[in-house]
Amino acid sequence: MFSRFSISFIIILFILPFNSYAQEKGAKKVSADASDILFSLEKADESQQPSSGTLFTASAQLGFLYLTGNTRSADIKTGLDLRFERDLWRSFFVFDLLLKKTEKEVGEEVIEKAFETTEQKWSVVSQTNYTLDPVEQNYVYGSAFYEENRFSGFDSQASMSFGWGRRWFENKQSSFDADVGPGFKRDVTQVTPEEAAEGITSQTQDTLILQAQALYIRKLNEHIEFKQLMVVKHAIEKGQNSIYKAESSITSRLIDSLQLKVNFIIDYNSKVDTDKENLNTETSVVLIYSF
């Protein structure tokens, strides 16, 4: 139930600025006269690129690796990134999927080979910011996150948070945003087939968190961009799982709509099963198509 609510909340967070924009457009339409309409037609192209930035951007990424020979495996990483910016609103929605299949030998007398899923992970995250002070760049935010990672020791992890943030500096080459606020996190533990056979069921761990995020963006030149993201979801209650994440990426523009992205992620859970690692890393190289 909570997972369905989380995903619905993520979608609402991203749609909210669109609804505000639609209402604004509707209000303007009621009061428009003939001269307003003619002026709007003449400036149609300019209206799609507001001074605050691009109105709407979308990009899809895809990475694929297939090995043959002594080892046969297939890796797929794909995702979708939607971003909306209009006046005082900024919103984004990001979906990521990672799938890995590796050949495994099965059977005793006759050895057979079959592909087995050795890693599977998908996640969605969304955040909407509303700027309170355009000069100082202070904003309030709402964010939501949901992930299913087959080999993390958790069936699912979800969180939501509200708080305050600020764009601490911005120039032509770089920007730095940071926000902090209270929130709520739910982890659902994973049960192995052996445990399920013994009647052991998954456990739900709910806790209040303090979430802090920071994003640094730097344009190294006209075609290359560096991003550094830090996310902390610290459990308030002692003994509960806290999440710490760092993501570094370099994106290089190949042509107008095609980019190459090298990404490195560090993901740390403070409390996991004894047979699982606290620290997980992920390195990927993907092509990104913007449309």
Image (cartoon, rainbow, N blue to C red):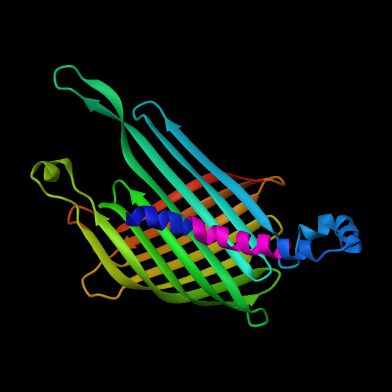
Q: Position of residue 190 (x, y in %)?
A: 23, 50
**Residue at x 53% of width, y 41% of height:** 62
Q: Position of residue 269 (x, y in %)?
A: 30, 62
- Give the magenta-colored segment's residue range: 11-25
Residue sitting at the far top? 110
Left or right of residue 280: residue 96: right
Query: Which quadrant would the N terminus be assigned to in this image?
Result: bottom left
Relative vertical location of residue 248 with respect to residue 201 in this rendering, above or below = below
Relative vertical location of residue 173 with respect to residue 263 in this rendering, above or below = below
Residue sitting at the far front? 30
Relative vertical location of residue 198 with respect to residue 29 in this rendering, above or below = above
Q: Quadrant of residue 42?
A: bottom right
Q: Position of residue 291 (x, y in %)?
A: 67, 46
The reply to whether the magenta stretch includes residue 21 is yes
175 or 194, which is in the foreground? 194
Q: Main secondary structure of the magenta part?
A: helix
**Residue at x 87% of width, y 55% of height:** 41
Q: Position of residue 18 (x, y in %)?
A: 62, 59
**Residue at x 47% of width, y 65% of height:** 143
Relative vertical location of residue 68 with respect to residue 51 in this rendering, above or below = above
